[in-house]
Amino acid sequence: MEKGVIIKGIGGFYYVRTSVSEIVESKARGKFRKDNITPMVGDYVEISTDKEGKGIIETILPRKNQLVRPPVANIDQVIIVFALSNPNPNLQLLDRFLIMAEQQGLSIVICINKVDLEMEDIKEKIKNIYENIEYPVIFTSVKDEKGIEDLKHYLNDHITVFAGPSGVGKSSLLNKINQDYQLETGKVSKKIGRGRHTTRHVELFHYGENGYVVDTPGFSSLGVENIEPIDLMNYFPEFRPYLGQCKFNSCLHMQEPKCAIKEAIGLNKISSHRYESYQYLLEEIKNIPKY
Ligand SMILES: Nc1nc2c(ncn2[C@@H]2O[C@H](COP(=O)(O)OP(=O)(O)OP(=O)(O)O)[C@@H](O)[C@H]2O)c(=O)[nH]1
Ligand SMILES: [Zn+2]
C-alpha cells in the first residue's frame, strides 16, 4: 500500500500523487460506492496497484474538512483575492468570503492584487480595516511582479485555495507563482464554459515539497444560509474579546442597550465598516425562511 493525495478526478478516475514525481491513475474500490462515499480532490488515500500498474483506492483517511465550492477536502488555508481596481473591491463581499472561511476553520490570508493600478485611498482603507483584525494582508501586482514572494511565503506545506470574485487575477497570480500551472486567464471562455455545463474540473497543483494550490472560478455572491443568527458574531474575530460582556446574554448587538460591541465601535476598537457588514448579514440570515 502506498499513501498519496488525490489531485484530480475525471470520469471515475482519480489521479493520486504518491511521491514527488509519481501520479497513479486510480479507481475507487466498490465498497465506497456502497457506503455512499465519493473520493474527493484533496483526500489523503492509501492505494494498492493491480497487475497493469493501475491504482485502487483502498482507504480514504478521515477528512479534516470539505468545501462544496470548490469541491475539495482537507483545505488548510484560503487566500482571498480582491483587486484594488478593475473590478473595484466590494468590501462587504470580502467580509462574506471571510465569514465563510472562518466558518470552515481555515487560515486566512487577504491578497489585494493589481496594486499597479495605484488607488492609494482604497489601499489605505483596506489596510486600516483588515490589518487591525488578525488577518495578514498582502498587496500584489502580477503586472509589476510585486508581492509575489510574499504570497509564496504562505504556500509551503498547506493545501491552499485561491478564492475571490471573477477577474481579480487569481489564475494570473497562480501562473506567476509557477509557470507550469498554465491556467487560463482573462478570458470569458471559462465562464461560457460553465454556462454550457462543461464543468471546469478542480485540480490540486503541486507547490514546493508538500504544498498544493487550488484555483477556483470566480463567483460574485455567496450565501450564508447555514449560519444561525446567534453564531454570526463568532466569525468576526475582532468581536471575540467583547463577547459575553453585553448586558444581555442573548445580545445580537443591534438595538439592545449596554452592548459591549457597540461600545467597542464607539471607541474605534471595531471598524464601523465591519459592524455594518455584520448588521447586513444578520438581517439576511434572519430573513432566510426555515423549512
Ligand atoms: N493591471 C493588472 N491586471 C491584472 C493583474 N493580474 C491580473 N490582471 C488581469 O486581470 C484579468 C483577469 O485575470 P484572471 O487571472 O483571469 O482573473 P481570475 O480571478 O482568475 O478570474 P476568474 O477566472 O473569472 O475567476 C486579466 O486580463 C489579467 O491580465 C495585475 O496585477 N494588474
Ligand atoms: Zn451586544
Image (tube, rainbow, N blue to C red):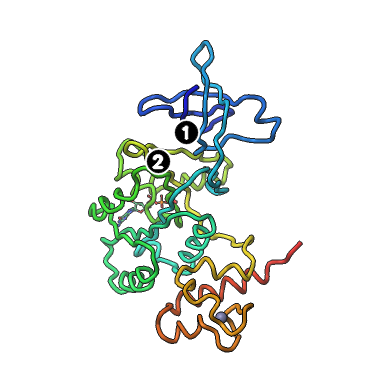
Residue 78's disc number: none
The residues bearing labels 2 and 1 have C-alpha atoms spaced at a distance of 10 Å
Identified at 34% across, 73% down, the residue is 128
Q: As rendered, which of 26 and 93 lies closer to the eye?
A: 26
Pinpoint residue 111: horizontal percent, then vertical percent.
36, 58
Q: As rendered, which of 169 and 258 lies closer to the eye?
A: 258
Q: Amino acid under label 1?
A: Val
Contact? badges 2 and 1 (CB < 8 Å): yes
Q: Amino acid under label 2?
A: Tyr
Quadrant (top left/top right/bottom left/bottom right) for the C terminus: bottom right
Q: SS at mark 2? A: strand
Residue 39: image quadrant is top right
Which is more N-terminal, label 1 or label 2?
1
- Outermost right residue: 291
Is 69 displayed left or right of 139 in the figure? right
Identified at 34% across, 64% down, the residue is 84
Q: SS at mark 1? A: strand
Residue tagged 1: 5
Is 173 displayed left or right of 229 in the figure? left
Seen in the picture, residue 17 relative to 184 is either above or below; the reply is: above
Identified at 35% across, 64% down, the residue is 85
Q: As rendered, which of 199 and 1 lies closer to the eye?
A: 1
Residue tagged 2: 212
Disc 1 C-beta below 8 A from ligand 1: no
Seen in the picture, residue 107 relative to 230 is either above or below; the reply is: above
Disc 2 C-beta below 8 A from ligand 1: no
